[in-house]
Image (spheres, helix red, strand yellow):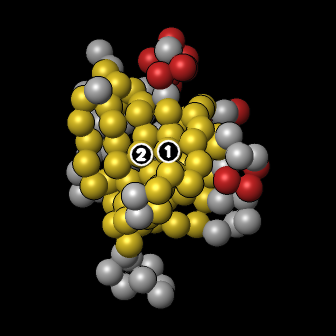
Amino acid sequence: MSQFHHIRLELAREPGRPAGEPSEGYDIVAPLDGDGRLDGDALRGEPERCYVRRFSRDETLSKGRLRQGPGGRWLVDMEDGDAGDAVGFRFGEERFVTGEYVSLSLPSGEQHTYVVARVGEV
């Protein structure tokens, strides 16, 4: 049975940021199965519980929802319009457990990698 979790993603190291940037990332509330994978069935059962907050330092930059789109793709649908949206790269296959890495693709084509910094039940 899946439970909803708070997942903290922090920007991992990349060119120009060799130490990463833990003060930039996403807070996500989403259902995870027993293996730490996103659960689309649980999301469809309670879509209003899936929440995303994009942050920089201690400031909220935007808020939105985690959704599952066509073909099972996971989308970060931000309230501030398409420019803030992102697509999870292979989110359906990734494990959201502390220390793992996941990637998000922005509409501009930029892709950023994030480390799963924390996961806790909500």
71 sits to left or right of 47: right
User: What distance separates the C-alpha of mark 2 from that of mark 1?
Assistant: 5 Å
| Residue tagged 2 | 27
Residue 31: % across, % down: 39, 27
Q: Position of residue 23 (x, y in %)?
A: 37, 65
* Quadrant showing the C terminus: top left
Residue at figure coordinates x 47%, y 22% from the top left? 49
Say which quarter of the image contains residue 102: bottom left
> What mark, if any, has residue 53 been given in the picture?
1
| Residue 15 in sight here | yes
Query: Disc 2 vs disc 1: Cβ atoms closer than 8 Å?
Result: yes
Name which quarter of the figure residue 38 lies in: top left
> Which residue sits at x=33%, y=36%?
6
Amino acid carrying mark 1 in the image: Arg
**For the point 50% across and 51% down, which residue is it?**
60
Please determine whether, in this image, residue 76 is positioned above or below residue 42.
below
Tag 2, which secondary structure?
strand
Dividing the picture into quarters, in which one does residue 107 lie? bottom right
Pointer 2 local density, CA inside 10 Å: few below 14, some 14–19, many at least 20 = many
